[in-house]
Image (spheres, helix red, strand yellow):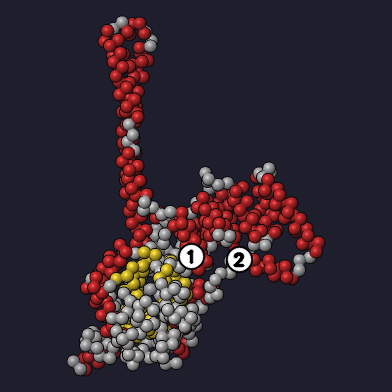
């Protein structure tokens, strides 16, 4: 594409010579990092205070140790000196009491008070479980093995080894338990095997042992239909703990079931059932595999001939007064449906202002409930978002006006600018932006008709992952800071274009900020498509 822009620039230059433009939000997690840093500083102050207190006690003890050692060698001679006798009375009556007060002084008050105040902002159990599920989501989407995740050596990560966290035995065990609590025996097995591997390699754990891990492994493998491996794990468990009651019962059961299978011969139906039980369980999303392939940049379906018809150009929207002299760069991302990208469309300063305005208001992103027409959270959309009106800051107003100038569509009936932040594992699974026939009340409350078009602005680069993928057509659009992609959701007839079904892939490494503008039907003239007519 760089060559393309070089050629366009040369052509434009020649022509002009002749005729004289992302728990799970990184924005909020950044605040948690600084909160933790403050707590560490507070903890260090507490340690310093404790050390100072102990140093005073130690000096007092050392002084008395020398004195009492000498005094007890000749008690009568020592006490025969009147000053020594007076000092003994004073020490026991006064100084030991002062020492008692010093020992009982609680120097942790400031630290405990700070911790109590900050604890209200801490993640809870649900947040931790959500983070665990995010790791497993990344594991599946990007086909990462547990060892890669455990060492922190993720593809696309530029962190030095010294800044890279690793997963301990306890961490892997906890991930396995989260999967187990969800009856997800596939991921239970993967993470328990990793925990056991790290134990076998000599890593120490103060909270879990091999017996406990093997117990989970035996059951999770059995639930996936692998009796032989269940038996192997059970036997290994009993080598470590011969008195384990459940394992002894399981051993007899597994041996009986295997003997029964061998005697009767495993039927083809039973073998098929066992094969189906292994691996990742099926879920609610029929296009899961296609979606994940596209997230990895695989499975793109465009012929070389069609690819050759995608161009880049300088775009002035039919000689719009604002862009005749300074047209914007436009690239074709896809042909059917037409998806275009505008380059350098928003400045860094403008994007930072949008983020600044949005951060205090970021909340768990919502979707339209097709049954009620109201906004609600959903498990398939994991991000935090905020809405910004044009009246709130000139930057928002300028961006809205820019969208109108470039698309030729009236944005006065559009929804407010939505700003979304996708942290690690953040995603929005395949969906349509427009309301379908089976959800006629989707945007009834707005009173502006259906969503005719989508404008999606990328406000950050993403180190790995985070693509916008169109599952029906097999397109992957990758985030590029300062660029915006645009497409129509409806045909000129007002019918929905089902080819626009799309998704935001999980962020593997980095931080994804986007803002989008959903433009509605009311107030539009379909003849004003500004060169974006379809060519089917």
Q: Is residue 492 left or right of 133 when viewed as pictured?
A: left
Q: Residue at x 30, y 20 (%)?
A: 95
- Locate the C terminus and report the quarter of the image it occupies: bottom left
Question: Which quadrant of the figure has residue 50?
Answer: top left
Q: Residue at x 25, y 80 (%)?
A: 401
The outermost residue toward the bottom is 18
The outermost residue toward the right is 263
The outermost residue toward the left is 20
- Please give the label number shown on residue 138: 1
Question: Which quadrant of the figure has residue 476?
Answer: bottom left
Mark 2 neighbour density, 10 Å: few (under 14) some (14–19) many (20 or more): few
Cα distance between the residues tagged 2 and 1: 16 Å
Up-down relation of residue 197 to residue 72 (above or below): below
Q: Is residue 513 visible?
A: no
Q: Is residue 429 left or right of 391 when viewed as pictured?
A: right
Residue 183 x, y percent position in the rendering: 58, 60
Q: Is residue 367 left or right of 418 when viewed as pictured?
A: right
- Locate the N terminus and report the quarter of the image it occupies: bottom left
Q: Residue at x 48, y 54 (%)?
A: 167
Q: Secondary structure at mark 2?
A: loop
- Please give the label number shown on residue 279: 2
Question: Which quadrant of the figure has residue 281?
Answer: bottom right
Q: Is residue 124 visible?
A: yes
First reached walking from the N terminus: tag 2 or tag 1:
1
Residue 244 x, y percent position in the rendering: 67, 45
Up-down relation of residue 320 to residue 174 (above or below): below
Residue 361 x, y percent position in the rendering: 32, 64
Q: Secondary structure at mark 1?
A: helix
Q: Residue at x 59, y 58 (%)?
A: 189
Residue 448 x, y percent position in the rendering: 34, 81
Mark 1 neighbour density, 10 Å: few (under 14) some (14–19) many (20 or more): many
């Amino acid at each position: 594409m760089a060559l393309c822009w070089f050629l366009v620039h040369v052509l434009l230059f020649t022509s002009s010579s002749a005729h004289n433009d992302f728990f799970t939000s990184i924005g909020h997690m950044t605040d948690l990092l600084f909160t933790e840093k403050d707590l560490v500083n507070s903890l260090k102050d507490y340690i310093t205070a404790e050390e100072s207190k102990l140093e005073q006690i130690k000096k007092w003890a050392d002084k008395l140790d020398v004195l009492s050692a000498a005094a007890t060698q000749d008690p009568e001679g020592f006490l025969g000196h009147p000053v020594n006798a007076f000092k003994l009375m004073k020490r026991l009556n006064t100084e030991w009491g002062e020492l008692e007060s010093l020992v009982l002084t609680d120097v942790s008050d400031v630290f405990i008070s700070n911790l109590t105040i900050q604890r209200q902002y801490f993640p809870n159990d649900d947040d931790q479980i959500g983070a665990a599920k995010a790791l497993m989501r990344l594991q599946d989407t990007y086909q990462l093995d547990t060892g890669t995740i455990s060492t922190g050596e993720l593809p696309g990560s530029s962190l030095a080894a010294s800044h890279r966290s690793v997963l301990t035995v306890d961490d892997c065990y906890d991930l396995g338990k989260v999967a187990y609590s969800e009856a997800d025996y596939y991921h239970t097995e993967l993470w328990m095997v990793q925990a056991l591997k790290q134990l076998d390699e000599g890593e120490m754990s103060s909270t879990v042992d091999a017996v406990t891990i093997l117990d989970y492994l035996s059951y999770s493998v059995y639930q996936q239909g692998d009796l032989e491996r269940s038996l192997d794990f059970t036997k290994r468990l009993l080598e470590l703990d011969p008195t384990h009651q459940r394992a002894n019962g399981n051993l007899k059961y597994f041996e009986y079931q295997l003997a029964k299978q061998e005697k009767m011969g495993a039927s083809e139906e039973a073998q098929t059932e066992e094969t189906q039980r292994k691996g990742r369980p099926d879920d609610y999303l029929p296009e899961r595999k296609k979606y994940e392939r596209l997230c990895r940049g695989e499975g793109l379906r465009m012929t070389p001939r069609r690819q050759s018809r995608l161009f880049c150009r300088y775009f002035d929207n039919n000689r719009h007064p604002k862009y005749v002299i300074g047209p914007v760069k436009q690239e074709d991302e896809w042909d059917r449906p037409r998806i275009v990208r505008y380059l350098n469309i928003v400045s860094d300063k403008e994007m930072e202002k949008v983020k600044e305005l949005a951060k205090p208001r970021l909340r768990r992103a919502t979707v339209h409930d097709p049954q009620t027409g109201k906004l609600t959270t959903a498990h398939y959309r994991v991000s935090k978002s905020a809405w910004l009106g044009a009246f709130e800051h000139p930057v928002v107003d300028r961006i809205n006006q820019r969208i109108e100038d470039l698309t030729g569509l009236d944005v006065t009936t559009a929804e407010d600018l939505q700003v979304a932040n996708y942290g690690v594992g953040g995603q929005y699974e395949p969906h349509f932006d427009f309301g379908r026939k089976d959800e006629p009340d989707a945007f009834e409350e707005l009173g502006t008709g259906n969503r005719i078009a989508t404008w999606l602005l990328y406000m950050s680069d993403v180190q790995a992952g985070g693509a916008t993928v169109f599952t029906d057509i097999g397109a992957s659009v990758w985030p590029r800071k300062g660029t915006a992609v645009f497409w129509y959701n409806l045909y000129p007839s007002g019918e929905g274009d089902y080819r626009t079904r799309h998704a935001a892939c999980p962020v593997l490494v980095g931080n994804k900020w986007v803002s989008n503008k959903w433009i509605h039907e009311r107030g539009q003239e379909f003849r004003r498509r500004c060169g974006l007519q379809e060519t089917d």
